Every structure is written in structure tokens, then in C-alpha cells.
Image (cartoon, rainbow, N blue to C red):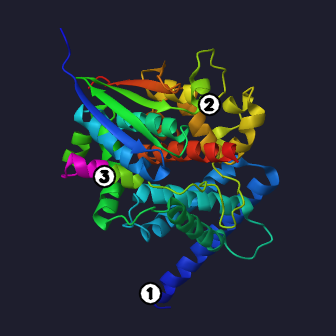
Amino acid sequence: MSTNQSANSRRSVNSERAREEDRELLRRYHHDGDTGAREKLIQRHLPLVRSLARRYAGRGEALEDIEQVGAIGLIKAIDRFELEREVSLATYATPNVVGEIKRHFRDKGWAIRVPRALQELNASMSGAIERLTGRLGRSPSIAEIAEELKTSPEEVLEAMEVGSAYSTVSLSTGPSGEDELDPLETIGGEDAGFERSEDRAALQPALERLAPREREILRMRFEEGLPQTQIAQRVGLSQMHVSRLIRKSLAVMREELLR
Amino acid sequence: MNEHQERIDLEAPLSGDFQAVVRLIVGGIAEGVDFAFEEIDDLQLAVERLLAEAGTTGTVCLSFEVGQNRIRARIGPLSEAKVAEALKDGELIPGQLTLRRILGTVVDSFGVDHAADGGIVVRLEKLKGPA
């Protein structure tokens, strides 16, 4: 057997073993409700998400944000996987991850034509804010962000506005317009907080437009009073992404209340 | 000692098309006081939510007093009765996500003045956090 044939054979065995391990974890999750198995599956396939997310880098969105969105697609794939399927989880998850990323770009809906340079500046701001927040121990000023990115404060402000451009469609709304289950509901746990409101009857439809993650972020911000930086740490998103979700969620809720 | 203050007045359409412009201006004013990213975002959100409740026709005046470590804004007159109703004093009920709760979270203080035409003017104050 040649060296190449030997390497191919080893890869094939490893791939088959990985597939079998995935199936066992999927069985434990779907049949036995073992959430630890679900977590292991997520961790095992995050490299796939990162690889797919990199294809969409440089389009005006921070890579880490694209990875977060892609991870949602992965979790949906794990949750929806039917054990009777003959395909591997990686094969099944790929279109889910790509679909979630594409939907994210579409939902973000640049309301106006945004110059590429500003989109790129917006994309790099997220990382700069995280770095500066870590280094300074507080939220950075615009001047500090500008210095970090070697640009002007005016351009940072413009780039912030680019990042706040969004459509009024909920991030949890699927392509058909129907609400889909947000897989990050594990972050939120049981519906608490705002849904205990005496105005529950009025607020309920508006809250239901939001994914559990978005409801939980609103609860952390407006009930616990946590700053965006802490919420970002808790939910594993960038501060800019948290800011966008808060604004968008409030807009979506108001739109629903006006119906 | 009197604190040095600058004032910026703006009259803007309530139409949503111009909200991005208002946000940008609010950001620029807050940057002038060296507010942190998060503080700017808070002030922008306060103004945005207030304007969202103020209807979509006509114009609104926004006046910003810029001090050394704070910004005071006056926004109005707003004729939408529900804005005044939403900002009325009273106990905040846990779990209610009202305009009062939102403003109470993102600015340091706010209040309502009654304008001559029967509308209201909302006062907001945002302080710069410790550096």
C-alpha cells in the first residue's frame, strides 16, 4: 500500500469513527434527553461552523458575529436531526449553518447603500471594543476606539450608525416569515421576568415575536440592569451585537403592539 | 462655580426616515463630551425610543445642553398623550417593560414638563461614567 493510500485509509477510518460517535451522542440527546451529549456535539462541530463562517468574512460583519450566527444553525441542525437519516451530522448541518448565516445578512438588511470602507470599519469595531474593554476595564470612548483602529472619531460614529441599520424583521423569523424556535433558549431558561407582568395580555404577543435569547437579553438589561458589556459576556456575543439586538427587539415589540 | 455649557438645538421630522440622522447627531454630541461607547448607545436608545412613541408626523425640537461630564436633553413638544401617560410617576411594576423602565435604565434621570400648547417636553440627563 502506498503512503497516500495508507493516509486515505486512516482518514476514512477516523471519519467513520467520528460519524459513529456523533450518532451515539445524537441518540443520547434525542432518546435520553442527555443535554451534555448535545453540548459535546456542538463543541465537536464548531470547527465546521468557523470554517463556513470564514467564507462570509469581509462583508461588513465581524467574523465572531458570523460564527455566533452559524452556531445557531448548527444547534438547530442538532435539535432537528432525525436518527433515521442516513446522512452524517456534518452533511446535514452544513446547509443549516450556511442558511442561518445568509438569513442573518439578509435580515440585517442594509437600509441604505453603505460604502465598503465603512462596512469594514464597522466589522473591525466589534473586536476593537472587546479588546479595549478588556484592557481598560470599562467601555471605551469613541476617541479611544478611533485611535485603536487608526481612524477618526467621526468615521467611528458613522460606522456605528452603519451597524445599527437593521430591518424590522425579527432575527428569529425564518425565510417563510414563520417564527422558528431559537436554539439558544437554554440561555434564557423558563420565561421569567417581563412575562410576569400585569400587562401580560398586552405584552405577550409582542414578546412572542422575540426569540428566547432576545427576551433574556431584554430582561438582563432592563430588569437586572446589567450593562451591555456584562450581558455580552453572559450570552457570548459581542457588545455591538447585544446593542443591536436590544434596539431591534424593542422596535419589533413596539411594531407588534401597534398592530 | 457655574459650569460651562454649550447648547445645540435641532428641529427634526418625526418621520422614521430621519431617525438615523438624529442618532448620528446624538452620537456626535456625546462624543464631544467623551462619553464611552456604551453611554452613547444608551443616550441614542433613549432618544430613539422616545421619538418612536411620539408619532410619525410633524416635527420635534431636540435641545442638548452639554456640560463637562453630562448631557441634558429636552425633547418636545410631544402631543401624543400616551407618552405622558407612559412617563407618569408611579410604582414600576416588576416585569413591565415600559418606556419609563427603558428610560430609567439608560439615562441617569428624566422628567416631564408641560408645554404651553398642551403637549409635553421630556427632559433627559445622562452623566459620563468614571474614566
Three-letter amino acid code at the position of disc 2? Lys
Where's residue A118, x and y in %?
30, 60
Which residue, given by chain and number where applicable, does mark 1 sit on?
Answer: A3
Q: Which chain contains the residue that carries disc 3?
A: A
| Tag nearer the camera, 1 or 2 | 2
| Residue A191 in view | yes
| Tag nearer the camera, 3 or 2 | 2
Quarter-of-image position of residue B123? top left
Where's residue B107, x and y in %?
43, 26
Q: Does mark 2 fall on the same chain as mark 3?
A: no
Neighbours of disc 1 within 10 Å: few (<14), some (14-19), many (20+): few
Three-letter amino acid code at the position of disc 1? Thr
Residue at position x 45%, y 54% from top? B17
The image's mark for residue A57 is none
Queried whether the magenta region covers residue A153, the answer comes back as: yes
Q: Which chain contains the residue that carries disc 1?
A: A
Q: Up-down: is B81 above or below A6?
A: above
Which of B107/B12 is in front? Answer: B12
Residue at position x 49%, y 39% from top? B51
Residue A229 lies left or right of residue A8; in this view the side is left
Three-letter amino acid code at the position of disc 3? Glu
The image's mark for residue A158 is 3
Q: Up-down: is B12 above or below B90?
A: below
Secondary structure under the numbered disc 2 in the rendered image: helix
Residue extent of the magenta highlight: A149-157
